[in-house]
């Protein structure tokens, strides 16, 4: 396979902090690579560098000539004044820039420049750009193309950014946490799309199912070194354990040999001059190797939950709506002691609102929640804690408590607690603004758990946390002697954590499913198959016709019928003329005047086709 990206000896640092040093790797055609590293190791920085959004200290980055690259950032940004469609056209991707250059050259009558642009327009299939935008947006459930960007939710904004990246049909797609803010339906759609696509992919994600089902290569940055694994995520886990065991065995062997060499080095000073230089050099190399014993540092979540009584909470006839959007409609539920509930549903169905109602952040329109006296909530919100960026890490924790007491009479100082959460003393006295996004989320998790809650409410807890932290958090939650509610789009996390699901189906309809997410998906697919077998396609069409009263269905007038017939003949003629013009424009045989005339004509035809095709579809719906 041909290489489309080669990175050699790449180094990046911020002051004294070296993120990575002398990284070298390549990406070949069709490879789908997952990048894994602990928080603060520079994953997002590396992707920003490859996307040209950030500088680097040294090294070389070489893309193959003509390679189309798209980048999906972790937090996409668009100007508020744009509509959805305008945001796609204002994109920085190559196709959008090419169209802007074409229109500028056409307006300026710059024939020399225009001739070069036309071949690029053909290469990037730019003539049909708007049509492709609308097709992809529709697949991503964005149907209001004129909706202002400022009105979109986080999930909708992520889908517009995703459509923006996919429109140019890139050879290399770089994605930073693509599943963040997407609901489960969209995550599964993207998973299927990427696994079937022939494009090369380089991505950072915490979603382990997504990694395993999409990627065929794993790159790991560990202690500033890069390791490559040719296989899926599960294969990586197996081989990584083998690598660490091998490294530890070598370090143990080196440590044993070092003891003998140390005795030799400490012999009388007067004999030092007679020591063989090669043996002295070998000693220092051996000393370095012995110190490579893999550190067992990891987040230690041995915080015990405080006592919780038998009464947890009861929901009594709770109702909530926002205008026409119904969240809850006379909802009743009794939560049990030590229950672990997962909440799933499409974006906008009301999952986070339900959490805020339970915690008293939002007020219901009717009914109430009756919460037990011993319940102590720990709330980890999707938005996260708004830290003062100019405070030191140690001060953030100390302001909550200088000393943290637990039920078994154990206690930790703020500094000791931070050390448990992998913030060494040097990091504790750094300012919050110097932390990576994942480190801030880890600090936030620390501030939630240090309050010793017995009822944890976690809203999208996996966003921005590295996989090592997630594994430790999962182990902690499995042994947690308290109650748990989790809202998450991370299927792997949900499968491990919850006993049952509360499914928000929309319009105030909730379903209590006894099982994890994988079981729910299997049940849902089986239900869909059974529904199809009970209602085959012809019957479905008849049922649809019954739903629409005859009096509501307007038929074509004679004039509209004639218009439809004319359009039916005219559209193929315009498409044929457009194809002929494209062929002539790319032939290289036209004079300057002919080139300008035909360029102007193809623009007119494209506009006519859009207008007539839309009218043809409108009339066709009435037949």
Image: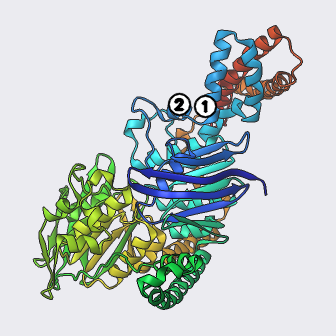
In the rendered image, the vertical position of residue 601 relative to residue 145, given as above or below = above
| 604 displayed left or right of 312 | right
Q: Which quadrant would residue 620 be assigned to in this image?
A: top right
In this view, 376 is above or below 585: below
At horizontal 67% and vertical 44% (from top left) the residue drawn is 169
Closer to the camera in the image, 419 or 342: 419
Q: Position of residue 496 (x, y in %)?
A: 43, 79
Can residue 498 be seen in this snapshot? no
Residue labelled with disc 1: 96
Question: Distance from label 1 to label 2 (Cα)?
Answer: 7 Å
Secondary structure under the numbered disc 1 in the rendered image: helix
Q: Which residue is mark 2?
A: 90
Position of 31 with respect to 285 (left or right) is right
Residue 412 position in % (x across, y down):
17, 78
Q: Earlier in the sequence, mark 1 or mark 2?
A: 2
Position of residue 153 measured from the top left corner of the image (x, y, whole percent): 39, 46
Q: Against 514, is 128 above or below?
A: above
Residue 143 in the image: state x and y as whole percent: 52, 41
Contact, CB < 8 Å: mark 1 with mark 2? yes
**Residue neighbourhood size for the residue with mark 2, other residues' Cα within 10 Å, grouped as few (<14), some (14–19), many (≥20):** some
Residue at point 38%, 50% (across, down): 15
- State the quadrant of the C terminus: top right
């Amino acid at each position: 396979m041909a290489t489309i990206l080669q990175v050699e000896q790449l180094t990046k640092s911020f002051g004294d902090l070296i993120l990575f040093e002398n990284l070298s790797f390549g990406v070949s055609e069709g490879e789908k690579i997952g990048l894994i590293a602990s928080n603060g190791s520079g994953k997002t920085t590396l992707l920003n560098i490859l996307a040209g959004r950030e500088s680097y200290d040294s090294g070389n980055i070489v893309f193959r000539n003509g390679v189309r690259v798209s980048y999906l950032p972790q937090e996409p940004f668009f100007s508020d004044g744009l509509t959805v469609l305008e945001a796609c056209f204002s994109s920085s991707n190559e196709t959008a820039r090419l169209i802007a250059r074409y229109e500028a050259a056409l307006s300026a009558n710059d024939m020399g420049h225009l001739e070069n642009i036309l071949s690029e327009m053909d290469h990037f299939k730019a003539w049909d750009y708007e049509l492709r935008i609308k097709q992809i947006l529709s697949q991503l459930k964005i149907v209001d193309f004129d909706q202002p960007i400022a009105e979109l939710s986080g999930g909708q904004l992520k889908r517009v950014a995703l459509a923006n990246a996919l429109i140019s049909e890139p050879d290399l797609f770089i994605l930073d946490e693509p599943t963040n803010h997407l609901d489960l339906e969209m995550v599964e759609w993207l998973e299927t799309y990427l696994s079937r696509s022939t494009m090369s992919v380089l991505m950072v994600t915490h979603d382990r199912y997504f990694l395993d089902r999409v990627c065929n290569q794993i790159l790991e940055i560990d202690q500033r070194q890069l390791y490559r694994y040719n296989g899926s995520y599960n294969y990586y886990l197996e081989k990584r354990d083998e690598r660490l065991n091998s490294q530890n065995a070598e370090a143990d062997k080196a440590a044993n040999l070092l003891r003998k060499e140390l005795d030799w080095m400490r012999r009388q000073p007067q004999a030092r001059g007679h020591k063989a230089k090669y043996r002295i050099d070998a000693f220092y190399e051996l000393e370095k190797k012995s110190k490579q014993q893999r550190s067992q540092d990891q987040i230690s979540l041995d915080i015990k939950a405080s006592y919780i009584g038998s009464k947890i909470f009861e929901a009594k006839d709770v109702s909530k709506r926002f205008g026409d959007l119904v969240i809850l409609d006379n909802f009743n539920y009794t939560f049990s002691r030590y229950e672990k509930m997962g909440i799933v549903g499409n974006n906008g169905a009301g999952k986070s609102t339900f959490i805020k109602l339970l915690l008293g952040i939002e007020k219901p329109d009717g009914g109430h929640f009756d919460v037990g006296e011993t319940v102590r909530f720990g709330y980890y919100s999707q938005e996260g804690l708004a830290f003062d960026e100019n405070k030191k890490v140690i001060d953030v924790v100390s302001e909550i408590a200088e000393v943290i007491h637990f039920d078994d009479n154990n206690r930790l100082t703020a500094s000791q607690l931070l050390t448990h959460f992998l913030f060494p003393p040097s990091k504790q006295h750094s300012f919050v603004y110097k932390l990576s996004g994942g480190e801030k989320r880890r600090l936030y998790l620390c501030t939630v758990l240090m309050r010793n809650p017995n009822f944890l409410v976690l809203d999208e807890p996996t966003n921005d946390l590295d996989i090592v932290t997630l594994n430790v958090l999962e182990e902690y939650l499995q042994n947690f002697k308290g109650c748990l509610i989790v809202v998450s789009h991370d299927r792997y996390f949900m499968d491990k954590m919850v006993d049952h699901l509360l499914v928000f189906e929309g319009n105030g309809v909730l379903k209590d499913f006894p099982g994890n997410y994988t079981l729910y998906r299997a049940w849902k697919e089986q239900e869909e198959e059974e529904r199809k077998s009970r209602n085959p396609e012809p019957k479905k069409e008849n049922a649809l016709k019954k739903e629409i009263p005859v009096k509501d269905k307007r038929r074509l007038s004679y004039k509209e019928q004639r218009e439809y017939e004319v359009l039916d003949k005219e559209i193929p003629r315009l498409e044929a003329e457009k194809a002929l013009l494209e062929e002539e424009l790319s032939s290289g045989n036209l004079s300057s005047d002919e080139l300008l005339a035909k360029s102007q004509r193809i623009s007119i035809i494209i506009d006519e086709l859009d207008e007539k095709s839309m009218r043809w579809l409108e009339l066709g719906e009435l037949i």
